[in-house]
Image (spheres, coloured by chain):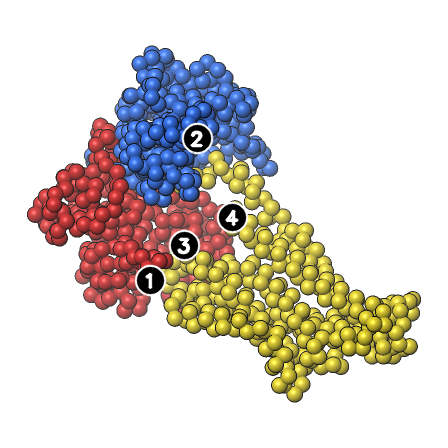
Chain colours: A yellow, B blue, C red
Amino acid sequence: MRLGEAGPEMSPEARLARGGGWRGWLGRKGWAGVVIIACFALMAFFAHEFVPYSPTATFPAWQPPSAVHWLGTDDYGQDIFSQVVYGSRASLVVGGLAGLLSGVIGTAVGLVAGYLRGLWSEVLMRFVDLMLVIPALALMIIIGAFLPSVGQGAQILIIGALSWLWMARSIRSQVMSERERGYVAAARVVGLSDGEIMVREILPNVMPIVIANLVMVITAAILVQASLNFLGIGNPSTVSWGSMLSLAFTDDAILQGAWWWVVPPGLCIALFAYGFVLLGNDVLDRYARKREG
Amino acid sequence: MATPRAGEGLERGETLRVQGLDVDYVTEEGVVAAVRDMAFSLRAGEIVGIAGESGCGKSTLAHAVCGLLRPPARIRRGRVELGGQDLVGLSERAMRSIRWERIAIVPQSAMNNLSPVLRVGDQIADAMLAHRPGTRAEAREKARGLLQMVGMSRRHVASYPHELSGGMRQRAVIAMALALNPEVLVLDEPTTALDVIVQAAILGTIRDLRDQFGFAVLLITHDLPLLLQTVDRILVMYGGGLVESGSADGIWRRPRHPYTRALLGAFPPLTGPRARLEAIRGMPPNLLRPPAGCAFAPRCPLAGEACRRQRPPLAVQGDAAAACWRWEAGEGEG
Amino acid sequence: MLELVFDQVTKTFRGPNGTTATAVDGVSFHLAEGESVALVGESGSGKSTVARLATRLERPTAGTVSLEGMPLQAVADLPYRVQMIFQDPFSSLNSVHTVGYSIQRPIAVKERISSPKARLKACQALQRVGLTPPEPFMEKRVVQLSGGQRQRANIARAIALSPRFMIADEPTSMLDVSVGLGILNLLVDLRAEEMALLFITHNLAAARYVADRVIVLYRGTIVESGAIDDVIQRPLHPYTQDLVAATPDPALPFVGGRLGDPETVEVGWCPFAPRCTRRTARCETPILRRVVESGHSVRCTLYE
């Protein structure tokens, strides 16, 4: 079809179809995700303001939820509510930073491998394929076992360095289709460098894919961090949702019927990750719709 | 197409008559006046071309004539008469028995909308069986005949669309449109995506078939020189309305409306003196807020006060007509 | 003399299943400074590939493209000597940038100057292509422009780099006629500024409007070339004859019926032989290009 035909004669329909894109950045799902994430962020940031007790202060053990201890106490007599609130910090810091780290690596690898054809692209992607067949969690456990101690910084590095693989693949395929568009050829003809074309011409166009992937990577990082802590890789003195679950498990919380020790941190992990999933899906949906219209 | 209606068709006179047709697009931002006060008729065996640029309403008109408008488009008023029967307001079911059997359309880029997984012959046969009962073998034999009729080989019934060139696919789509021997064939930009040699060949085929079977053709295109060479009568549309109509020869020798003159002057000639041509200045009207007077007035070199105030009626002169207050004033300059 | 030269250039694309397709097959021609040449061919003739080869978007499989005697791959400042206008004005400007950024950025890169200085030059370029006053256009995004305005912005970006050669790849085929004429007039005016133009089109009449010389391309090979009015009035190659006859000209009667469709793709020496009504057995053997008279050459056994 001649594009010139999309004049006034067709624009009413086109305009109706496009109308949704102007009403804000996100849809209802996306905003719900943002609200969930913001609640946890506020909780982490202002933890010391409203937590009734220090997470390490001790009280009578195995208390069920009550007015004094809203979510009861564990087998050391520590207040669960306070632990859950403080635990959000570890998830936020490790999940966020590890997610960002792998986001940067994934975007860079995806852009380069998608834009440059030939040997470079092949080498990069074969490396990614190789890494993808190695179970990442197992690798992290092994690395963790060799290191003398795994603090938050080390956790961030390990998770960040091993979580970008899918993201690189997804961004690469998007960049490969983007590089066939007219503006890329035009940018090459007017003499812009490859680096500039990747970063300033193509990257803004694939930004929604980057954001959606980033959100997924952060989700994964939060879950991996919880898993690592649950498996005992990490600093046991840092309170996190994962380490809480780990302790509850080793100290037979289930046998004791202490559901209040297991359910809150579990719910928090699920809800926090779900917030990111909502946000990521919404960004992707909108991007797909925009491309069709 | 075994029994052509050729002989009787030519004397039958008008087959299609459009009167006072208005089409709106209802959008969030308001009502777009896509077609306004459109009137024309089509005689049996006649090829009429509709010329105009993007947004002039020519495709909308084609869809309105075939009862194919879907929301947000709607017919506000007017009549579309086929053999004396008004098609406006007919139920979709009633329309379905008329469309394709009596008035067939080849929509823009229809040749790219053939199903890629079915053989061309089967697609034609399926469509025929949906309208006329019969056996599959008969339908397929008829498809063979149809393909041969439009200049393809009979063996092409067994071809898949991707095995055919663009021109061949367009011929196949035309064969399908002619399958039930319609009175009127509407072609919306049938050759836009094709090369000129193929375009000329296909239009030659359409003219031959018209001579043979006597159906009327409504040919919509932006290519005015092509219409001047190949059709009997031309309607020129601008801003949703008819600005001029006349015989192809009359429009070529003596265009009346300033828009027709400007449009003719925008096509570089293949022969004759090489002179600089002037493009039409300005932009087409925004049909969300159509101008009060003549739609072309803001871009017209002849426009005066009256042109901006009041919409000119279609002034008929013999078989020619133009909607312009001042066309006589511009005659000398053409 | 400054020249853009194609010497026996062939470009073969590799398909997904090991298939190959030759888009351009042994094409030789030259474009001298200040000259205006039209490259005419239908879809699939390889004319866009020629444009991409001339701007280094593709590398030739065989043969060389050279500028002033130097192979194109070795020309460091190619973007500032050869520029291109693309067919699709809707996708050739990046929608995330303003028009101003898209035009001034290449200038800033070329002249190593700051954005404000480049901005001034970008404004001048917009003025030259008729987008006046330029300031409001600088701030606009691509979606706010009409098709004709976008194509003008594309031209502004190209001429702002002061190239000596301009490749225009079907710059009006996606525009309305009256809008397209404005673009053609702009190209004619640019020529007056001594910019050589390679005007690629499927429309012989538009070619005549813009260019002095024409090269007719069919399935990747040059079948005929010469002065444009010469070729239109006395086409020698059967394909050119069909092309001229099929191009709508209201001054002449319609001759549609006698022309054939392309149907089968047989590989012989002459790519047009399968459609040609005058083919002989000799069309399967190599055909040399023959100069019939000054500047008018044809590649067909009829003229051997």
Residue ID at (57%, 35%): B27
Q: Are marks 1 and 4 in contact (CB under 8 Å)?
A: no
Element on which disc 1 rests: helix
**Quick check: A120 left or right of C199?**
right
- Asked if labels 3 and 2 touch by Cβ distance under 8 angstroms, the answer is no
Instruction: Tell me which residue sits at (48%, 63%) in the image.
Output: A172
Mark 3 Cα within 10 Å, few/some/many (few <14, many 20+)?
A: some
> Do callouts 3 and 1 point to residues on the same chain?
no
Q: Which disc, if any, is residue A292?
A: 4
Type of residue at label 4?
Glu
- Name the residue rendered at 57%, 75% in the picture: A161
Q: Position of residue B101 (x, y in %)?
A: 43, 23
Q: CA distance from mark 2 to mark 3?
A: 39 Å
Name the amino acid type tagged 1: Pro
Q: Which mark is residue B127?
A: 2
Q: Label 3, on which residue? A: A182
In which chain is the residue bearing label 4?
Answer: A
Task: Please state which of the two labelled residues, at mark 2 or mark 3, is closer to the viewer.
Answer: 2
Residue at horizontal 63 percent and vertical 72 percent from the top: A97
Give the image location of residue B45, x and y in percent. Answer: 33, 19
